[in-house]
């Protein structure tokens, strides 16, 4: 049985087999660099790694992996040790590994899963790509299932009493805004922001435009936390989507507006108060979450 391999010895082995200058293998992701620069074919590099480690190789480009197979190992474990299961037959689990000689990792996975591990060597960057591909699909399906339980019902808009404010001109038409507000990526993004805020128990969502980014903050336990940042190019689409949901005028961008919307989330009704305020970089949006179902009374005092 081969002993745990050393990264530097591996590089020396690859350099010797391919007759390469050492600088080509300096730094991280050298395997990806060799393939992308067409220094060596993927099959040839896999063959060299297989010879070095003493284990068979698997080409993950041509391997379809079912989500239920990947989920046998937690994502955090797979990413930490660069492993991914790709086939299960009876008590045996075929495992693609960046370092199949790592006995400690194999034993840990054998102990936690109950399967007999059959190790295969794979290119590290292909393992990362496959993990992202498979777990990304699984997360999208899970998230879509969650979002199917949240339904929005816009209410009639209220007349704003605030004075007009001058804002930076926007080169975008009303038809553009209406179209952007209903496009699937923007719908999913806005739903995702609201869903995450509900799950974290936030009381407010602040969507704030700046010159080089759109910043999203949640108020949790009275403190505002930055949770995400986006390209400024999508700010109009985000604001337009929220205006549609809350019954506000999409075309009005120079005056503050106030609106309401309701959502049914996990069987309970959640009310939102929505405010838009013009700024030099676009409209700022604040959603006040009135989630009565999430209120908890502390009667210990």
Image (cartoon, rainbow, N blue to C red):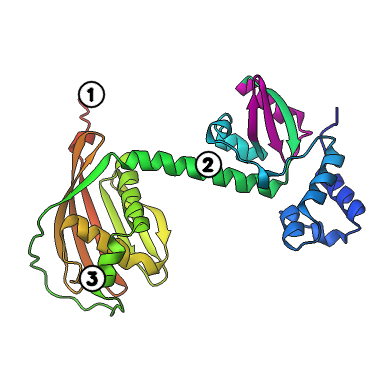
Q: Secondary structure at mark 1?
A: loop
Position of 103 relative to 270 (above/below):
above
Distance from Cα at disc 3 to Cα at disc 1: 44 Å
Looking at the image, is 191 positioned above or below residue 108?
below
The answer to whether one can see residue 25 in this image is yes
Q: Is residue 200 visible?
A: no
The answer to the question of whether label 1 and label 2 lie on touching residues, with beta carbons closer than 8 A, is no
Name the element at disc 2: helix
The first of marks 1 and 2 along the sequence is 2
**148, 249: nearer the viewer:** 148
Q: Which residue is mark 3?
A: 278
For image coordinates 46% across by 41% down, the residue present is: 139
Indicate whether residue 86 is drawn in magenta. Answer: yes
User: Which label number is shown at residue 76?
Assistant: none
Disc number at residue 300?
Answer: 1
**What residue sits 28% from the left and 66% below the top?**
179
Q: Residues within 10 Å of mark 2 (few under 14, many from 20)?
A: some
Left or right: where does residue 234 sit relative to residue 76? left
Determine whether the residue tagged by mark 3 lies in a helix, strand or loop. Answer: strand
Q: Residue 135, labelled with which disc? A: 2
- Tag nearer the camera, 3 or 2: 2
Task: Give x and y (percent) for residue 196.
Answer: 35, 45
Tell which circle, 3 or 1, labels the residue nearer the N-terminal end.
3
Disc 1/disc 2 C-alpha distance (Å):
43 Å
Q: Which residues are drawn in magenta? A: 85-113
Q: Is residue 90 magenta?
A: yes
Q: Position of residue 136 (x, y in %)?
A: 50, 45
Residue 236 lies in quadrant = bottom left
Could you tell me which quadrant the C terminus lies in? top left
């Amino acid at each position: 049985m081969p002993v745990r391999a050393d990264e530097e010895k591996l590089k020396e082995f690859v350099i010797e087999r391919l007759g390469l200058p050492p600088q080509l293998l300096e730094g991280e992701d050298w395997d990806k660099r060799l393939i992308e620069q067409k220094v060596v074919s993927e099959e040839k590099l896999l063959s060299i790694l297989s010879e070095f480690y003493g284990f068979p190789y698997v080409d993950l480009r041509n391997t379809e992996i079912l989500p239920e197979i990947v989920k046998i190992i937690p994502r955090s474990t797979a990413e930490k040790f660069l492993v991914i299961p790709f086939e299960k037959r009876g008590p045996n689990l075929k495992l693609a590994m960046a370092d199949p000689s790592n006995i400690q990792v194999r034993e840990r996975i054998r102990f936690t899963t109950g399967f007999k591990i059959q190790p295969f060597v794979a290119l590290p960057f292909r393992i990362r790509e496959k993990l992202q591909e498979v777990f990304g699909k699984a997360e999208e399906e899970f998230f879509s299932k969650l979002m199917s339980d949240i339904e929005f019902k816009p209410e009639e808009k209220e007349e704003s009493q605030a004075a007009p404010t001058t804002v930076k001109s926007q080169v975008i038409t009303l038809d553009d805004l209406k179209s952007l507000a209903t496009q699937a990526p923007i719908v999913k993004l806005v739903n995702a922001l609201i869903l995450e805020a509900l799950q974290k128990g936030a009381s407010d969502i602040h969507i704030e435009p700046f010159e080089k980014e759109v910043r999203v903050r949640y108020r949790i336990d009275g403190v505002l936390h930055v949770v995400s940042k986006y390209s400024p190019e999508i700010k109009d689409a985000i604001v337009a989507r929220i205006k549609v949901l809350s019954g506000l005028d999409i075309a009005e961008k120079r005056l503050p507006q106030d609106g309401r919307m309701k959502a049914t989330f996990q069987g309970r009704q959640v009310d939102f108060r929505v405010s838009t305020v013009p700024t030099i970089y676009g409209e700022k949006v604040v959603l006040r979450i009135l989630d009565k179902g999430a209120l908890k009374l502390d009667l210990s005092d």
